[in-house]
Amino acid sequence: KDLLVESLIEILHQKFPESDTEEQHQAYLKPFRILISLLDKPEIGPQVVGDLFLEVTRAFYSCCKDALGSDLKLSYNQSGNILASAIKENKNASEIVKTVNLLITSLSTDFLWDYMTRCFEDCFRNKSTQMRYPLENISTPPTISELCTLLVFLLDVIPLELYSEVQTQYLPQMLSYMVQSLLENMEVLGLPELTHALKTCFKVLSKVQMPPSYLDIETGSGNGSPVKKENVDITLETKSVLQEEDETAFPPLKSEDSGIGLSASSPELSQHLGVPTVTLERDDVWKKGGSIQKTLHCIQELVARFSSKYIFGVQFQETSNENISALNLSGKEKKE
């Protein structure tokens, strides 16, 4: 397996400066198609993809950058229409995006966002403790800025609307873990890294959507808080609304519909990656004490520390780490 991973990394990053444009384009597509084929083999496909998906993402960004050139412009605000339009107008870039999207939809629906969340947490941990990167012998460890660039790129080229739970469940959980990691490791980041990370968090936030059932409840209650009230009547009403939606709405597309690779509930992929950080099984994302409320608390703390250190020039007292630990502990207790 290690030899296969090393070989695939080599193929993902190989360059063909002397080849013509069409040959280069086919060479760019080849490794992604190989991975799609490997996913049909559950005994090895999930393990390989889980080990080198960061390299897949790096190669995806690099291929699109080569195809688009100066037209690849990342946007950190809510709109990603500039990049999407550039891809549509470029045949080669469009085919690369379609092929990688086919690879991603062949995986479980939460895989990409859980994987990027783990990458951020590992990167912060490695920066603060100088841990070794598992693939450092054949690949360079990612930096905070590189992960931010890759994530913003993915948010603009991956069709988030394909699965409703991406924007209502996975991205809110991902954002919560990102801001918690950022707050816990803020002192080891330079100002450029911190600024880049904060802009990326804003980009993720711009893609988050509140579930329709919660919007209906908040509209009726007249309370602007994003956290759902703990009320028995409201809970019952929410369940009835969700049941009605399940009966009337079209069922969401699943990865099985792609006709390729693993199903959304692949036991092989789950077994290899372990317990996911970002998962659909969490039902407290929009509730009191859930991911959204933790995110708000962490953002308030981040703004306070950032202002104290970089605006007012005062070293902020690290008295709030206990609050972070308390938030994490309460989240774990609820999860259990």
Image (cartoon, rainbow, N blue to C red):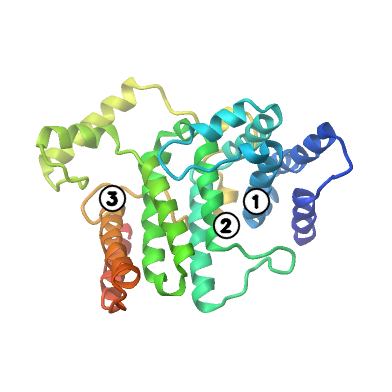
Q: Return the residue nearer the eye: 83 or 236.
A: 83
> Does any portion of residue 313 appear in the rendered image?
yes
Residue linked to disc 1 = 58
Say whether disc 1 or disc 2 marks the residue closer to the N-terminus.
Answer: 1
Question: Could you tell me which residue is drawn at 40 percent across and 57 percent down?
Answer: 198
Return the x and y of residue 335 as percentages of the image width and height: 32, 58
Labels 1 and 3 touching (C-beta < 8 A): no
Q: Return the residue nearer the eye: 286 or 190.
A: 190
Tag 1: amino acid:
Arg
Q: Return the residue nearer the eye: 211 or 280.
A: 211
Mark in front: 1 vs 2: 2
Residue linked to disc 2 = 146
Q: Is residue 23 left or right of residue 66?
A: right
C-alpha span from label 2 to label 3: 31 Å
Tag 3: amino acid:
Asp
Residue linked to disc 3 = 284
